[in-house]
Amino acid sequence: MDAISDSVTVALEGAEAVKAKLVMASGRLNVSGGAEGVMEATFAYSDPKWKPEVTYEVADGLGKLKVRAPHTDRPRRGDPEYVWDLRMGKDVPLSLSAKIASGSADLRMAQTRLSELDVKMASGPLTADLTGDQTDLTSVSVKSASGHTNLVMDGSYPVLDMIDLGSASGTIDVTLSGDYPVLKTLNIGSASGRLRVTLSGNYPAVENVSVKLASGSADLDLSGLSRPRGEISVGCVSGKATVTIAADVAAAIRFSAVSGKLVAPGFHKEGKEHVNDAYTAAAAEASAEGALRLSMSTVSGKLVVQSPEEA
């Protein structure tokens, strides 16, 4: 059956902000920005019964857009074409949620005024690139069951205060660079996958970075942090966490385990914590309260703390 291609344009109709909800059973979702109105979309599909349903209404200045795959009793056998190419508007704040059962998702949001992002994906690769000056963005939540999730944020995020990422058995790659003046919480969790997190930027308000594993592995690169501070907590049953911290950063580690292991060259025991020389020097100057504090609670896991030179 020949592929069908439809184009749909949705105008603002006076909306001062837009809340968009995307629901796809299976297929390929591509989202970018730069549209003049709410959305400029092209849909490609192999069966007329698979034509996406698009609805839009405006009330009290809020535009509500919904794009969903129709319910159909005709199965998609083999690998039929089902692709959504969506360009979202660039002029008003956009709250975007997407729910995808299987397939792939590629979100490139630089040319939007993204205010919220909430993505749930059952299986398949997901890339969310939120690079740019995102002056309206307040929260990011990305959850997946399996597959590879890649989150890239390199820009300015003046009102973003929460990032929440999770995966059951997939891989999560996170690169956060730029300015995050009010970001307080970063939560990352995985049951049995692998986490790779690079924090390189300015995080003056960060209070808690939480990484939770069951049996996977986590690599946290904190060597590029400007004025590192706050609490980094790692919880795992039997996984391994590797944390890279610059040697000149005042850091303290609290490690508790049933039969786990701590490997931290350059750190020595002081009371209930392991501290490095930079922490000892800062404490002597009564400035250790601004230190980076790392804690890990585990049954039989392993925590390795290293410098960039050892990585």
Image (cartoon, rainbow, N blue to C red):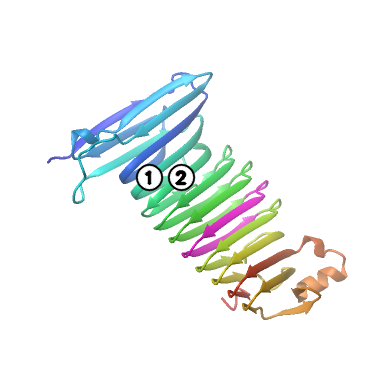
Q: Type of residue at label 2?
A: Val
Q: Is there any visible trace of residue 227 in the rendered image?
A: no
Observer-nearest of 198 and 34: 198
Residue 80 pos. (x, y %):
20, 46
Please tell me whether residue 156 is drawn above or below residue 269 in the rendered image. Answer: above
- Label 2 SS: strand
Dominant SS in magenta:
strand
For marks 2 and 1, the one nearer the N-term is: 1
Please tell me whether residue 145 is drawn above or below residue 196 in the rendered image. Answer: above
Residue assigned mark 1: 100
Residue 187 pos. (x, y %):
59, 54
Q: Type of residue at label 1?
A: Ile
Please tell me whether residue 104 is drawn above or below residue 272 in the rendered image. Answer: above
Q: Who's the residue at 80% across and 76% down the image? A: 270
Please tell me whether residue 273 is drawn above or below residue 81 in the rendered image. Answer: below
Q: On residue 69, which mark appears?
A: none
Query: Within 10 Å of the Cα at label 2, are there few (<14), some (14-19), or many (20+) other Cα atoms?
Result: many
Q: What residue span does the magenta drawing correspond to?
A: 180-202
- Give the side of residue 291 with respect to residue 261, left or right: right
Q: Is there any visible trace of residue 285 in the rendered image?
A: yes
In the image, residue 3 lies in the stretch drawn in magenta: no
Label 2, label 1: how many angstroms apart (C-alpha)?
8 Å
Q: Who's the residue at 78% across and 73% down the image? A: 272
Query: Within 10 Å of the Cα at label 1, are there few (<14), some (14-19), or many (20+) other Cα atoms?
Result: many
Observer-nearest of 102 and 32: 102
Residue 300 pos. (x, y %):
58, 75
Q: Who's the residue at 78% across and 71% down the image? A: 279
In the image, residue 190 lies in the stretch drawn in magenta: yes
